[in-house]
Amino acid sequence: MAFVKFTEPGRSYAAKASVSKTGMLSFSDGCRRRFQMNDYTHCVLYYDADTRRIGVELTNDASAEGVRKMRLRETGSDVAAKSFVDYFDLGIRETIVCPVDRDEETGYLVVDLTKCRKRGGQKSESGRTGT
């Protein structure tokens, strides 16, 4: 196997999402690349209260029920989700960072709120922030 030169120092390629206390759901550049988020303009959000997971269905259908416009950035993507965070009373009191995976059954991106850490490295208590 040949060596491949790494030319992107200083960047993270981990698939992560952050949820801010203002309700902004942001995806890392690694997440944007791994899950081809550049191919989509919108998403629909879901919540599973039993497992404390957010499901993100990527779509280009701007007329889908509950659809939200995604903003693609050079360093990732984000979606305004304040009403979603408030509706499900997610208890986000400070910005948290969570791993992102793809659910094989639904195809949704999954943000697991039980595996989050506070921005800055501390694990959030019981999967909830500010408690």
Image (cartoon, rainbow, N blue to C red):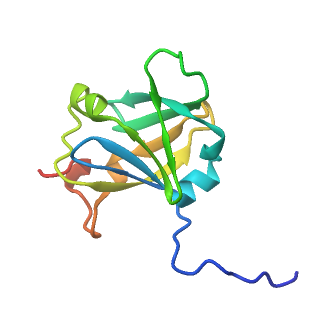
Residue sitting nearer the eye, 52 or 21:
21
x, y (%) of residue 44?
48, 27
Q: Residue at x 21, y 45 (%)?
A: 92
Residue at far left of view: 131
x, y (%) of residue 36?
65, 47
Judge whether 90 appears above or below 13 on screen.
above
Tell me: 16 left or right of 106. Answer: left
Q: Residue at x 87, y 83 (%)?
A: 2
Judge whether 74 appears above or below 64 on screen.
below
Judge whether 94 appears above or below 55 on screen.
below
Q: Residue at x 55, y 54 (%)?
A: 31
Q: Quadrant of the N terminus?
A: bottom right
Q: Residue at x 48, y 38 (%)?
A: 70
x, y (%) of residue 49?
32, 30
Tell me: 100 left or right of 53. Answer: right
x, y (%) of residue 14?
53, 63
Tell me: 16 left or right of 108. Answer: left
Residue sitting nearer the eye, 56 or 114:
56
